[in-house]
Each structure stands twice: as C-alpha cells, then as structure tokens.
Image (cartoon, rainbow, N blue to C red):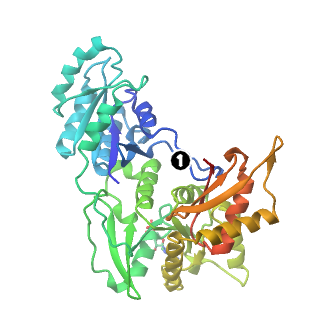
C-alpha cells in the first residue's frame, strides 16, 4: 500500500482533513483498555485505491522550536511517504513557514500536492495564484470544514502513486517483524537468528524505502525479517520521539504476517509493551510473544509459569498468542521460535470448511443460548469465512445489535477451540440477513 503524508504548519487544518479522509473507522476489537490508536496513522481509500495516511502534525518533537518542529515533520513525510499533501491556508495566504517547508520538500523530489484549505467561497479563488509560487504545480482549493474539494485533491494524490503495487515476495515467504520498546533486545535477537548467515542485507525498494528487510532461510523455508531496529536513522532528532517510533512499528506491522512482541524478561512488562502489542492485535496480525533476556532472570521451577501468568493478565486480548522464553545473548531456546512463527502464520491463513463452521456454531448455541434484548432474541442463521489473514467470519443474524460483545467473544472462543487458531486473532462480523 502506498503511503500519503500530510504536512504543513500548525492550524492549517491537517487533522480535519486527515479525519475526513480516513472517516470513522471501526477497530476490529471493541475494547482494549488503554489502547487507542493515535490519530496520526490510519488508512484511506479513494476510487478503490487503498493507502496509508499519516498526519505528521500529530508527531510532536518535544521542546523543539516551531520552525524546527515543522522541518522535522517535513523530513518524516519525506522518509515515509510516496505522495505528500502539503497543506496551506488560503485565508492567511502564503507564509514564510510555507516557503520553508516547500524548500525541504522540493529537495526530496517526492511528488507533492498542494492543498489550499479554508477556501470555502468562489471569491477566494484568486488567492490560489500565490500558491503556484511554491513550485508544485496546480494548488487544489479545499474546505476541510465543508468537505469541499477533497475529491479533486485525492484524484491528484492517487495519480501520483508509484506505478506498480509490487508484491515484494513470494506468497509462501513468511514476513515477520520484531516490535517492542528500545533495548528489549530486538537487534540481538535478529542477530541470534541469523548467526553466521547474515550475508544478505538488502534494501528492497518498495513503498517503505528505509526498512531493512533481511531474507532468512530456516529448514528449507523462506522468511523475511522486517527489522525496525535496523531502520533507525542516526542523528535524526525525531527518531527519539515516541509517536515516531510507534509509527515505525506500525509500518513494520502493516507489512508483516507475524509480529513478534518482544518483552524484556529482566525488567518485566511495562505499559508501553501493552500499547505496542495492542497495535499488532488491532492490525489483525499473527502474534508470538517473546520473553527475551531469560538468561538474566534468577529462576526456580515456578518462575516461568508465574511470568506467563503475568503476561496473560496484562495482555488479556492476546490470549491466543504463544509465549516463547529465550535468550538472544546465550542463544538458548532461540531455536524454539521459528516453529512458533510457522504455526502462527499457518493459522493466520487458515480456511475452514463452511459446514463444519456452522456445526460448531449450532453446538455453541445449544450449549449457551443466544441473548435477548427487549424481548427480542438473537437468531443466528448462517456463518461463513470471508477472509484470511486474519481469519474473518461473517455471521448472518436477525439483528446485529443483539450480538453483544460477550456473546461474540463466546462464539469466537468456540470457533477457536474447534479449529485451533493459536497465534492469530480472528474477526467476527454480524450482518443482518438480507
Ligand atoms: P533493541 O533496542 O531492542 O534492538 O535491543 P538490543 O538488541 O540493542 O539490546 C539491548 C541491550 O540488551 C544490549 O546491551 C544487549 O546486549 C542486551 N541483550 C539483548 N539480548 C539479551 C539477552 O538475551 N540477555 C541479556 N542478558 N542481555 C541481552
């Protein structure tokens, strides 16, 4: 998927446009306490073209002066995006800050589309001519508050997408990434996996230019490691801002089949781990939890069970994810990781037989009758799997509102138990029967 970034100085209306483009998206999980996706990264669609959208204005580089902040945001847009929407304000006209941003964008040679916001009546069209001076071609008048001009803007944006949406790897290549806060040992683990075989480090061209993708072979099977740690850019101020690292993690997650959520066994679980794991879950990726630095933990025969329980308590929403304890440093148990990745990835792509699925649901309903609300009972007619990665099921019912969260959860667990979806989230959607 191509990526579009919105840049521009504060208060030109970037987040209004961001929200207009992505619309109100419903997450696949109703409720993960403490995990709300920051509204800086989402996906949009126009004329059947799907893309990622970043609001760089939401990435604050703490303490930086105004101008530095804007420059850093422009740099992020250049690093991350295939097409840049450069937002300006038609009411205020062209400003020095706009020209400053233009200079940076100009050097990058990335396609830039200039949007002139707050042009909500025809008399204002004259002001547009000033914006030709930015040197990015025709400026597009829009009105974020009225939703005008968005179609024209997006037409131009998608016209600038890179030609080929190349599928970078073979279908049976498993792509996995390692996410987790700094210093949990992600790079060490990549090195432990690769061992002496670290020969090919390629920078594969695609929509994410800075990702380091490392092809990896194990037991005759092909993998690609998407190395977020390897993507760090030395000396860039914004690398250390939390939202930016989250953004990077999201990009890696987006491209992965399996996400390894790496936790530092020595330090235990902290809030940030939960947030990062929540992103992977919400994105519907297969997940394996890795507890690293297990060598440094003083243990007895109960330690592992206790740690496992702690993880289960903290990550209630990841009850399906297997947990691997290992040490990247001593390489102990590192060999147990790949089989778990294989399993999670297989389940992530599993298709079930429709008749069996419906038998499972019939049995489940017999065991635990459907809920009623205001005298009306939920009726389930039929279920079918509509997608893989993650496995997604549509359940046709009389009234979707009657499918309460707890009942949905119950059905989900029955489906899980029946088919063995270890390592992957599954998604249930209730639809009214037509
Ligand atoms: P990253 O930021 O997540 O990529 O973490 P690094 O791979 O750079 O590791 C951070 C620090 O943890 C380094 O000092 C590593 O030597 C150390 N480290 C990594 N893995 C292990 C491990 O399994 N055991 C111990 N004791 N230390 C580790």
**Label 1 crowd bin: few (<14), some (14–19), many (20+), radius 10 Å:** some
Tag count in the figure? 1
Nearest to the observer: residue 433 or residue 40 = 433
Q: Quadrant of residue 385?
A: bottom right
Judge from the rendering whether residue 69 lies leftward or rightward of residue 311; answer left or right.
Answer: left
Q: Which residue is mark 1?
A: 37
Nearest to the observer: residue 74 or residue 374 = 374
Residue drawn where x is 30% and y is 66% of the image: 168
Residue 364 percent location from the top left of the image:
75, 65
In the picture, the quarter occupied by the N terminus is bottom left
Nearest to the observer: residue 351 or residue 82 = 351
Regarding residue 148, the answer to whether it shows in the image is: yes
**Position of 362 relative to 60 (above/below):** below
Residue that protrudes farthest toward the front in the picture: 434
Residue 46 percent location from the top left of the image:
36, 42
Judge from the rendering whether residue 171 lies leftward or rightward of residue 329; answer left or right.
Answer: left
Residue drawn where x is 63% and y is 60% of the image: 383
Q: Tell me the SS state at disc 1.
A: loop
Residue 8 percent location from the top left of the image:
33, 33
């Amino acid at each position: 998927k191509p990526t579009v970034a919105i840049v521009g100085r504060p208060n030109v209306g970037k987040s209004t446009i961001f929200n207009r483009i992505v619309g109100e998206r419903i997450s696949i999980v109703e409720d993960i306490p403490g995990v709300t996706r920051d509204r800086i990264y989402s996906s949009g669609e126009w004329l059947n073209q799907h893309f990622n959208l970043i609001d760089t204005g939401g990435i604050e580089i703490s303490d930086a002066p105004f101008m530095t902040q804007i420059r850093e945001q422009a740099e992020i847009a250049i690093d991350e995006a295939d097409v840049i929407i450069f937002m300006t304000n038609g009411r205020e006209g062209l400003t020095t800050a706009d020209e400053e941003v233009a200079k940076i964008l100009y050097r990058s040679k990335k396609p830039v589309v200039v949007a002139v916001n707050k042009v909500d009546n025809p008399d204002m069209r004259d002001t547009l001519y000033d914006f030709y001076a930015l040197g990015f071609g025709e400026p597009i008048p829009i009105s974020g508050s009225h939703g005008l001009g968005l179609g024209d803007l997006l037409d131009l944006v998608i016209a600038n997408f890179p030609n080929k949406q190349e599928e970078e790897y073979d279908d049976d290549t498993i792509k996995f990434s390692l996410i987790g806060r700094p210093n949990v040992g992600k790079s060490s683990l990549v090195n432990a996996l690769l061992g002496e075989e670290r020969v090919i480090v390629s920078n594969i061209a695609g929509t994410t230019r800075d990702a380091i993708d490392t092809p990896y072979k194990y037991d005759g099977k092909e993998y690609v490691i998407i190395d977020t740690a390897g993507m760090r850019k030395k000396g860039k101020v914004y690398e250390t801002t939390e939202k930016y690292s989250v953004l990077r993690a999201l990009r890696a997650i987006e491209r992965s089949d399996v996400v390894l959520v790496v936790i530092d066994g020595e330090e235990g679980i902290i809030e940030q781990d939960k947030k990062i794991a929540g992103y992977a879950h919400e994105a519907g990726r297969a997940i394996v939890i890795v507890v690293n630095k297990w060598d440094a933990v003083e243990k007895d025969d109960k330690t592992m069970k206790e740690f496992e329980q702690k993880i289960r308590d903290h990550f209630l929403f990841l009850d399906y994810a297997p947990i691997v304890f290992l040490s990247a440093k001593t390489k102990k148990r590192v060999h147990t990781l790949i089989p778990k990745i294989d399993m999670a990835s297989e389940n992530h792509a599993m298709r079930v037989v429709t008749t069996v699925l419906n038998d499972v649901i019939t049995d489940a309903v017999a065991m635990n009758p459907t809920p009623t609300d205001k005298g009306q009972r939920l009726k389930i007619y039929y279920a079918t799997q509509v997608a893989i990665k993650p496995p997604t099921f549509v359940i046709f019912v009389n009234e979707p509102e009657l499918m309460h969260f707890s009942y949905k959860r119950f059905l989900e667990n029955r489906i899980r138990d029946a088919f063995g979806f270890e390592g992957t989230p599954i998604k249930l959607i209730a639809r009214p029967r037509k």
